[in-house]
Amino acid sequence: MDLAWRVCPVPLWLLLQSLLLGLSAGAAVDWPAQEGKEAWDYVTVRKDAHMFWWLYYATNPCKNFSELPLVMWLQGGPGGSSTGFGNFEEIGPLDTHLKPRNTTWLQSASLLFVDNPVGTGFSYVNTTDAYAKDLDTVASDMMVLLKSFFDCHKEFQTVPFYIFSESYGGKMAAGISLELHKAVQQGNIKCNFSGVALGDSWISPVDSVLSWGPYLYSMSLLDDKGLAEVSNIAEQVLDAINKGFYKEATQLWGKAETIIEKNTDGVNFYNILTKSTPETSMESSLEFLRSPLVRLCQRHVRNLQRDTLSQLMNGPIRKKLKIIPEDCSWGGQSSYVFISMEGDFMKPVIHIVDELLEAGINVIVYNGQLDLIVDTMGQEAWLRKLKWPYLSKFNQLKWKALYSNPKSSETSAFVKSYENLAFYWILRAGHMVPADQGEMALKMMRLVTHQESDA
């Protein structure tokens, strides 16, 4: 493939914006400095398994990209696309209408979006047995990609490297971070790994499920009868997990969601102050035709592949990238990604977070106040299960209030940190924190990467 297709001295997002404004790529446009370039490519991580990544160099007007951190963003699902949803819906330079995002993280960090596991977004497999079936494979694949990336982009080897994640991406980020730490220690990958941020993360699924009932009840979204029904199915999920029946636990998890929707008049699992979208409701009417697993995939992965985003990715973006195979459509294999991970989906990874903390890796947990599927109560519950020696001292600390706007007295978040563990409570945000509270999410990223202080 021609390398010129993959490295763009002029940011692709500006090219796209110019096209939207009716300009040609050769028209007079006020381009930023050279550090605003982009790069993208595929890495074959295993036989028949190809992973796509997309890099934006930071565009801070006062600093070169080499003076700012590199942030890798991992989406959830599994099967949600970082290069699509994380990029155009949350933290990238443009939104899905190709309009500039005021709260883009690109002003404070270079951004690396990776479509993982293989089969997600523009990533693809050639054979069905190449899909990842567990976290070990997901982490192993990412080690291949990161080694290739840092070998080819030596300018980032000394830049502080952070992994930020969301939802199931947090579970993957935990496993990936531990393997990356080992690879760096062994000298297999050259990078300055500086920390991992677990956002609304599926670290301990059962703790989320067990807290759904009490959380909804406290928010006046369940009555006594509804609470009893949700608590009953949650106990069934717990029993299945205790017995190691993880596929059964996944199916019971789906049943629990259905019970909640019926008792709450269709509460949105991603933000309790809203209801499920009409599109989701239409799909629900056909759910009886689908298997339980397919229904779960449609409900959660489809949410990350809205029509507007899908049209953008399979239209202008695909045309500009030029390296996407003809028989590969963005999101075309995502349902198989989700289904292939069925046996791994409900497994907890609290022990991995413990290993990260013990290794001295900076671990940041953040959660949206209005999230249900990974509610804050559930996050706090698994945190209390950590065996980290400093946990008692962490728990004794009083949190600090944070303000996204220094001129406003409105509290945007709370934070508590001790040694290498921090927790951010993000107010008025649902599951997708950067989409709901862009200013606070950007501030949090700057705090995590030591670009400002919470004092």
Image (spheres, rainbow, N blue to C red):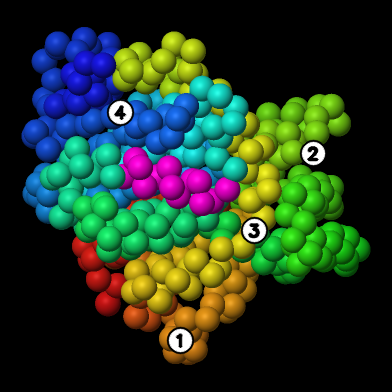
**Alpha-carbon span between mark 2 and mark 3:** 18 Å
**Alpha-carbon span between mark 2 and mark 1:** 41 Å
Kindly identify which residue carries mark 1. Answer: 389
Specify the amino acid type for callout 3: Lys
State left or right for residue 293 relative to residue 415: right
Residue under the point 69% across and 63% down: 206
Counting residues from the start of the chain, the first of labels 4 and 2 encountered is: 4
Q: How dense is the environment of label 4, judged by Cα within 10 Å: few (below 14), some, or many (20 and up)?
A: some
Q: How dense is the environment of label 1, judged by Cα within 10 Å: few (below 14), some, or many (20 and up)?
A: few
> Residue 14: image x %, image y %?
23, 25
Counting residues from the start of the chain, the first of labels 2 and 3 encountered is: 2
Are the residues flagged by discs 3 and 1 in contact, CB closer than 8 Å? no
> Residue 327: image x %, image y %?
49, 13
**Alpha-carbon span between mark 3 and mark 1:** 24 Å
Kindly identify which residue carries mark 3. Answer: 347
Kindly identify which residue carries mark 4. Answer: 41
Specify the amino acid type for callout 1: Pro
Where's the N terminus, which quadrant? Answer: top left
